[in-house]
Image (cartoon, rainbow, N blue to C red):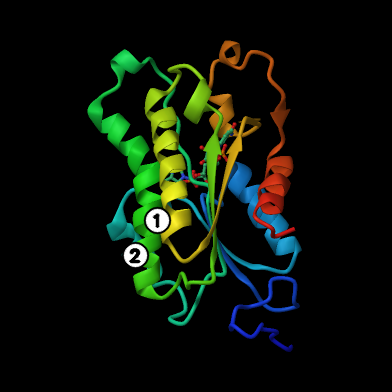
Amino acid sequence: MLTEVDVTGVPNYVADVLKHALVVGGTRGIGKALVERLIGMGWNVEATGRQQFDISKPSSWETWRLTLPADLKFDLVIFSAGELTPYPWRDKLLSDMLHSYAVHAAGPVCFLSWGERQGIIPWWARVVFISTVGAINTGACDLGYGAAKAALEKTAKALKENAPWEITLIRLDLVNTRMLRQLPSETLHGRPVLEPEEAAELILSEAGIV
Ligand SMILES: NC(=O)c1ccc[n+]([C@@H]2O[C@H](COP(=O)([O-])OP(=O)(O)OC[C@H]3O[C@@H](n4cnc5c(N)ncnc54)[C@H](OP(=O)(O)O)[C@@H]3O)[C@@H](O)[C@H]2O)c1
């Protein structure tokens, strides 16, 4: 199989080459739909959940790294990990809030810089973050989650300006996954709900992959 590269050495995304993607949070929900769609398009995909590594625990990244081929480089990294603990903000502990921040904002950033140092996230990689309309305009159903996503949005903007990767941030409304099913139905206000496959298509289209 011929590997097409342009003059800058960047692999050509539309060419028939073996492309490697990492989907963090690829074991369920939107991430799983992304994994299935990418595999259907011929990508080689590493799908991870907490069993493989915890995005909020750097020591677990090191152990997972040992399971990968030494020379593996990801052309695409999608952060689709997420946790939601919908209980009133007055009952939240500082540790809950910090955990949300670590999973949704700080963990992905530190993972990127670690992955760059490890040589698994090269400069030509595309990086995708998934945010929520709740980062901006919903109530305090899970304030830690919403605030962490707001931090992610700032982070994505800063990385767009300062990091080598092509960054996409997509802000979704409701998607029919385990995460959504944790929310009390009265908080959904009859808003339309996408299926994970529809969300995956939207994300890959925004990122210029399909
Ligand atoms: N569903 C929605 O309505 C909606 C709307 C807007 C944005 N989003 C965002 O879309 C992304 C995907 O959400 P989803 O609805 O697909 O959720 P989901 O069905 O609950 O799936 C979450 C995924 O994240 C993984 N995960 C959870 N905690 C993790 C951790 N600490 N470290 C590593 N992996 C972890 C889970 O893996 P295991 O369970 O296998 O460990 C699973 O693969 C999230 O970032 C979410 O905030 C969702």
- Does residue 93 show up? yes
Residue at 73% over, 48% down: 201
Residue at 69% over, 71% down: 13
SS at mark 1 in the image: loop
Image quadrant for the N terminus?
A: bottom right
Q: In the rendered view, would you say 74 is above or below 33?
A: below
| Comes first in the chain, label 2 or label 1 | 1
Q: In the rendered view, would you say 145 is above or below 141?
A: below
Most distant residue in the front direction: 161
Image x and y of residue 195, in percent: 72, 36
Q: Nearer the viewer, residue 47 or 146?
A: 146
Residue at 67% over, 50% down: 206
Label 1: few (<14), some or many (≥20) within 10 Å? some
The amino acid type of the residue labelled 1 equals Phe
Q: In the rendered view, would you say 97 is above or below 187?
A: below
Q: Is residue 209 left or right of residue 123?
A: right
Q: Nearer the viewer, residue 174 or 133?
A: 133
Q: Is residue 56 left or right of residue 1?
A: left
Label 2: few (<14), some or many (≥20) within 10 Å? some
Image quadrant for the C terminus?
A: bottom right
Q: Does the numbered disc 1 mark a residue whose Cβ is under 8 Å from ligand 1?
A: yes
Image x and y of residue 142, in percent: 42, 23
Image x and y of residue 186, in percent: 59, 10
Most distant residue in the top direction: 186
Most distant residue in the bottom direction: 2
The residue at which mark 1 appears reads as 53
SS at mark 2 in the image: helix
Image x and y of residue 4, in percent: 70, 84
The amino acid type of the residue labelled 2 equals Trp
The residue at which mark 2 appears reads as 114
Q: In the rendered view, would you say 195 is above or below 115?
A: above
User: Rounded to the nearest whole Å, what is the CA distance between mark 2 and mark 1?
Assistant: 14 Å
